Image: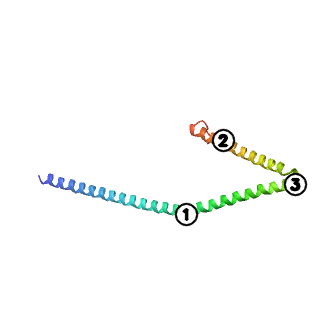
Amino acid sequence: MTEDKVHTDSETAGDDSLLGSARALLEDGQSLIEAELAFQKARAGFVLGRAKGILALATLALALLFFALMALVMGLLLALAPLIGPWGALAAVFLGLLALTGFCVLGVIGRIRAVSRALKGRDSAA
């Protein structure tokens, strides 16, 4: 009978030790999850803080690019007006810009088709 009691006590001690280890592991896992969430929140805050400045600079750059292109168009109009007349200069600049726009639209359509083919699995080189 003493052997059964010793055997049962050692099993209970083993179960307590295993249960304690499992609890410690669970607490460590919870601590790691909390630390990871805090890290990711800090990271997201940093990125959002920087994104405001990036967006402001990108907006300014696009506005300045627009004005530079407008200056180019006006310069072309003024340079071509004495050569082919004001209406001819207007037509030449307009048709040139229209052709560039068409090339850009064709490029966009081609890329959309390529992406669509890749998503449908028809294109092996995505």
Local secondary structure at mark 2: helix
Q: Is residue 61 visible?
A: yes
In primary-sequence order, the first of circles 3 and 1 is 1
Q: Which mark is residue 82?
A: 3
Residue 102 location (% of width, % of height)? 72, 44
Q: Residue at x 30, y 55 (%)?
A: 22
State if disc 3 and disc 2 touch (CB < 8 Å).
no
Q: Position of residue 33 (x, y in %)?
A: 39, 58
Residue 59, percent across and down? Answer: 62, 59
Q: Where is residue 37, by image quadrant?
A: bottom left
- Circle 1 residue: 50
Q: Is residue 66 above or below residue 104?
A: below
Reading the image, the residue beneath label 2 is 109
Name the residue at 59% across, 60% down: 55
Q: Of the residues shown, which amino acid type is indicated by label 1?
A: Arg
Foreground pick, 118 / 59: 59
Q: Quick one: 84 or 119, which is closer to the camera?
A: 84
